[in-house]
Structure formats: C-alpha cells, structure tokens
Image (cartoon, coloured by chain):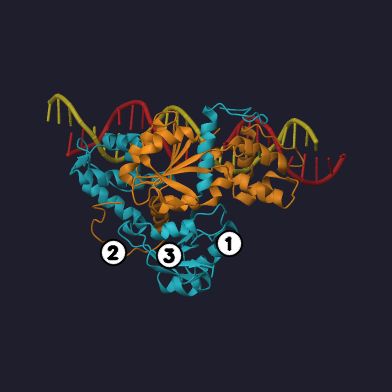
Chain colours: A orange, B cyan, C red, D yellow
Amino acid sequence: MSEATVGRLPVYLRALVELAGRDVASVSSSRLAEHVGVNPATLRRDLSSLGITGTRGIGYDVKYLLFEISVVLGVNQEWRVAVVGTGNLGRALANYQGLATRGFPIKVLFDVDPDLVGTEIGGLPVRHVDRLPELVPKLGVTVGVIATSVEAAQGVADQLVEAGVTSILNFTAESLHVPEHVVVRRVDLATELQILSFYQRRDTAVSGGAGVPLSGED
Amino acid sequence: MSEATVGRLPVYLRALVELAGRDVASVSSSRLAEHVGVNPATLRRDLSSLGITGTRGIGYDVKYLLFEISVVLGVNQEWRVAVVGTGNLGRALANYQGLATRGFPIKVLFDVDPDLVGTEIGGLPVRHVDRLPELVPKLGVTVGVIATSVEAAQGVADQLVEAGVTSILNFTAESLHVPEHVVVRRVDLATELQILSFYQRRDTAVSGGAGVPLSGED
DNA sequence: TAGATTGTTAATCGATTAACAATC
DNA sequence: TAGATTGTTAATCGATTAACAATC
C-alpha cells in the first residue's frame, strides 16, 4: 500500500464519520471522492488495496467502510502518548482534547525547567525529564511527542527510543536520527508556512531584495 | 518545479544555515544530500530546477546557495499572519516565537468567545471575528491560520479569502474549499498521529482480533 | 432487462536516480 | 594533466487516472 494511500485514509475516515452521522447508508466512490477531493478511481484503488470491497451498481456500505478503515488505522486501539517539552506548544497539546478522543490519550508530560516541573497542565503534572526512562515503560507509552527546543530534540528522541517508544511526532525543525523500527513524522509550523508562502510568491509580485537574513535560526 | 522539491527547500535551507554557521565555504551535492537524507542527484536536480548552479569539480558555494534558496522561499519577505481561534492551539501559535523570527509575524488574533475577546495573548489583543473583514486588509495580512473548531473552519476560510488572504494554514480536520488563487495547507495533529500509528501497527503484534485488516498487503 | 457502479487493466503522468559527458 | 563534481540524459520506479468489462 502506498504512502499516499495511508495519508488519505484519515481523510476518508472523517468524511465517513460525517456521512454515518447523517445516517447515509451507502455511498458511491464518485460521491465520496468528490467529498474529499480525490479522483474516484484513486479512491477505489485505495480501498481495493486494503481489501475493502463495495457492491457493483450500488456503492460502498458506509458503516462497513467506516469500521474497516478504523481497524486499518488502529483507531479502536489506544496509543498512549508522552509529551516532552511543555512550552507553549506542549501546553497546547496537553490541553488539546482532540487527541484523547481520537485514541491518543496523553499519559505524561515532561520538561527540564524546574519552574514547570510539578505544575499541572490539563490535569496532568509535569514530570522532570530525568524520570522519562522510568515512567514511559511504566505507563505503557508508545508514542512520543517532541515539543522541545531544536537543540534538545535529538537527545530527547534517543531517550524516548531507549525507553521503548516506537512512534515519534516531532514538532521541532530538527531531522531526527532513529533506529529502523521507530517511525518519525515531523510537523514544523514555520516550514509549513514557508512552503505556503513559496506558492504565494509565484503569483504575487515581490518587493525588493533584503540582504541575507538567516544568520541565526529558531 | 515539483511539489516535492518545494517541500525539500526548507530542509536544505536549515542544513545550509548550519554549515554557514560553521563557516563551511562550499559543499558538494553528495555531502549536503547525505546531511539531509536525500539522493545527491535529486538534490542537484532540485537546485538546477531553481536555476541555482554550482561549480564542477568543486561543489556549491554555501553562502550563495543559502541566499538563493532564501530568495526562492521568500524568507526575507514579511508575511503577516492572522490567527483565528484562540483556544489552546491558537494560544500556542500566538505565543510561538518561531514564526515571527522566520518572517511570519502574527499581526492579529480573532475569536468569537466573548470571554476571550479583549484579553491579551503574547502581547496581542484578541479581536472579535466580526472585525475580521475590517482588520485583515488594514493590517496587510495575507496569511490566515485557522485554529477554530472543525465546524467553524469553512466559514472562517470564506471570510479570510473575502478579506484578501491568499494563504491559509488549516489546523482543523476540515477539508477547506477555496478559490483557485488561494493556497491551503492542512496540519491536523490527530491525523498525523493516525498515520504514525498505522505504520506502527504493521510491526507491532496487534491485540484483539477485529476482523481481517490487511488481507492485501504489499 | 436497463442503469449504476465496482474492481482492475492499461495508459499516462511525474518524480527519482543511475550513469556519464562536460568541465572546473 | 588527474581528480572531483556538476548538470542532465535516459532509465526506472511508483502513483494517478481514464476506460471498460464484470456484475449488482
């Protein structure tokens, strides 16, 4: 199954949740595809590659589709999350309800800052990162979210991996090096904006030259 | 130039900033490529497609490369940002210094909640979203960040577009519909985690049987 | 049966990369 | 000149999608 397919599954899932909520019983590939903005053939191929079948002449059963995709994505499973770094972003994540409701309950927060350690965010106490090796296995955490400074990111990743974490969501700009069996995804807000603005630049007439800016970065 | 190329530019940029910081004067495609984890031929093709040239037998001049990529990405330009929705995520964004330092200063915050309107976050007052049509053009905002509820997202997008915003970073799970000239990127944290956990499921022995998942693999 | 829609083949498109002539 | 490395051609790989036979 292609990486692109995997990326589309959550999108399909969301559309299906909505359809199920409206008590729509079945849906054609063209209707669903239009809803999520992909080509109908692509959608059918995606489903077919998951072994999910519809009914010719009819379409796909919404509930069945919803269930199957949920299973593939492991939505019914619980993935316990540790958030490392409780600056603004970490704090936002800790307070974000959307994670727990989608099967990613945050079980523990870590920081190095003595002013933060011991405080509570979203009902969870912030632990010192020194306790990471102890608490991560104990709490059954398998997903780590890194919301630290760029400088600390690789060290934290190493510790998480050492403690048994196998999935890492990296919010720093650092490219993390991890063993084969660990999966990393990076979400860098400034990078997203840079890409966004690149596409804008093509259209917009651009003002003049400003010298070399990036001496120091984030 | 391919979309994939654009996505790699910020990564190149970061590596170059580091090299420049270490006073490295020139770098070969193979060295830089290894540093960022891409194929050297891909890197050379990327640069070549931007009209950036190196010197045969020598490599690329780091400062020149840094400058050129900065120009392409518009890093020297200022992109004024409006954040709509000042819940936890919006609040985190408003406090996040990384955006302003990379050329994306947040100029205004919006919310509908009367309890939030009038409060200050990161030194900026929260405005009522009713004032969006007035304030966005006035402040020269061209980038909108949507950190509202899923339900409000499309309406906010419409308002932003109407007010002149041409780039939208969407933090909700909603697939936004916008006119051709508007660029949207979506960052959905739960989606990222779902994708992450999907890849983990493949390796991990999975508990409780729930139906046949991946009858067809590859 | 007639109409609709799947599942998949085959064509197409686009991106990656090995390989190498050009050239510093 | 000898060694190194670019810039690009051509091969390859993989993903998308039009098209249509299968079939509900």
Amino acid bearing label 2? Gly
Q: Give the number of the mark in front: 1 or 3.
A: 1
* Residue position for label 3: B142
Q: Residue drawn 50% across and 50% down?
A: A123
Classify residue A213 as left or right of residue B171.
left
Q: Are marks 2 and 1 on the same chain?
A: no
Residue A48, image x, y percentages: 64, 34
Q: For this rendering, which residue is in front, B67 or A157?
A: A157
Chain to which the residue tagged by mark 1 belongs: B
Instruction: Name the element at disc 3.
Output: loop
The quadrant the N terminus of chain A occupies is: top right
Residue B93, image x, y percentages: 42, 57
* Residue position for label 2: A208
Instruction: Name the element at disc 2.
Output: loop
The disc, 1 or 3, on the residue closer to the chain's N-terminal end is: 3
Check whether the beta carbons of the residues at disc 1 and disc 3 lie within 8 A of each other.
no
Chain to which the residue tagged by mark 3 belongs: B
Residue A198 quadrant: bottom left
Q: Residue drawn 64% across and 47% down?
A: A33
Please, is residue A65 above or below residue B118 in the view?
above
Q: Residue drawn 47% across and 68% down?
A: B164
Q: For this rendering, which residue is in front, B2 or B79?
A: B79
Classify residue B49 as left or right of residue A46.
left
Residue C1, image x, y percentages: 87, 39
* Residue position for label 1: B152
Please, is residue B176 above or below residue B196 in the view?
below
Amino acid bearing label 3? Thr
Q: Give the number of the mark in front: 3 or 2.
A: 3
What's the distance in space between the residues labelled 1 and 3, CA to CA? Answer: 20 Å
